Amino acid sequence: MASISQLHKQLINKERSAVEITQEYLHTIEKLEPQIKSYLHITKDLALESAQKVDQKIARGEEIGTLEGIPIAVKDNMSTKGIPTTCGSKILEGFIPSYESTVTQKLHDQGAVILGKTNLDEFAMGSSTENSGYQVTANPWDTTRVPGGSSGGSAAAVAADECVVSLGSDTGGSIRQPASLCGVVGLKPTYGLVSRFGLVAYASSLDQIGPFAHTVEDAAVLLKAIAGYDSKDSTSLKVEIPDYTTSFTTDLKGLKVGIIRETFGDGLDGVVAEAVNQGIKELEKLGAQVKEISCPRFRYGLPVYYIIAPSEASANLARYDAVKYGIRSQADNLMDMYTQTRAQGFGKEVKRRIMLGTYALSAGYYDAYYLKAQKVRTLIKQDFDNAFADVDVLISPTSPTTAFKAGEKTDDPLTMYLSDLMTIPVNLAGLPGMSIPCGFDGQNLPIGMQLIGNVLREDILFKVGYAFQQATDWHTKSPNLG
């Protein structure tokens, strides 16, 4: 389990070459992929070529950046020029983009070594990575269990040391929930902080790209590398990106922490509640002032999300019509080609959400469902605004449970949707949220604690997370993969 800073030091001191480091991670991938199945595409040649360029730069005596030569994995819903981008869907099987997403271009520009594209729930719709059209990713801590979703491949790849850090996307918890289930750090940044150009859209007002890492420090380094204004994204924020590592401290004296009352109660596993409460006590030892905070509309996040997100998805996924890209079913007329291609290419969960969204947007139901959901979304944001008038950071469990068995919830969509109960309101409000490991249950499955910050206050999340990790060792634990 090597950090970015450790590998960077080894490179500049010429203790190891970038090619050697890359080959080591490629070997781990080759060894573990038959059981973990984190990757949909492994870009071995590209990775070694990128590593060679870093070694040549070092040989010339040139300085290298923090990310140069660092092996990274990318969720397969970010466009990568010349590399397959499937979104975990059969409808995009064989699709190779002609352009690069902004975030992956930034990684290339900074000399990062991209090892491959990771598995996900189809079009990022799911909480277990069981909805992929290609394979089911396993949780490295127990391969009979799910890694969470939709960014399960990215989370599992970090947990299994198949990469140093990775990128995922978060629409309703798809970074934080798998981070919790896989025992790693996962951050959803403020909406608009990271460009969505080249991220294949699920729900455009909610989607956001963010990092997975073993440590808060690595997550901070990766966020700085990918954040920033992008004219290609109309929702991109024009703000200066700080060096987040300057906010690190081991003293939280004076920091006000709010515990969201509504996140502790029915539906929360007792062992998860105990671990998070122990984590809160640790923050108190570090000097934080802790108080209970009420966000009364927090519980409405789930129903609001499952109206707004499917509505936006039904519009975004209309582009997959067999004309421009993706697979095409043979048919006698245009309408049959549309319907047969979509019936063949989309999985059950995607079809379910398209139908839900189309219904919510249809004449006669728009006001009753979609418009009302948007109004409640505003009230949820107001609750957060009120909370941040009193405290600096909010805390809740990340997931109501630890990792569940593969297949356990696939026949009950409503139970599966509850996996994102704690994370969804953060997306609806456009706030930054981070999951950090805070314990294990009796079956040695990781538990995550969610930190929620006000808009553009990622620095506070990193400050709290770093202090917590300096005082605990949960993040240093590794699964036994033989």
Image: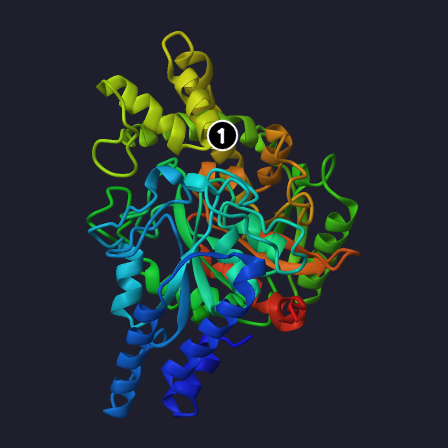
Q: Is 290 left or right of 12, judged from the image as shown?
A: right
Q: How many marks?
A: 1
Foreground: 206 or 98?
98
- Where is 255 relative to 13, above or below? above
The residue positioned 50% from the left and 28% from the top of the image is 306
The residue positioned 28% from the left and 42% from the top of the image is 235
Q: Quadrant of the C terminus?
A: bottom right
Q: Is 163 left or right of 267, judged from the image as shown?
A: left
Q: Position of residue 312 (x, y in %)?
A: 37, 29
Label 1: how many Cα within 10 Å (few below 14, some 14–19, many 20+): few
Is disc 1 placed on a helix, strand or loop? helix
The residue positioned 36% from the left and 77% from the top of the image is 69
The residue positioned 45% from the left and 75% from the top of the image is 4
Q: Position of residue 277 (x, y in %)?
A: 73, 53
Amino acid marked by disc 1: Lys
To which residue does mark 1 refer? Answer: 348
Q: Position of residue 150 (x, y in %)?
A: 50, 45
Q: Quadrant of residue 287?
A: bottom right
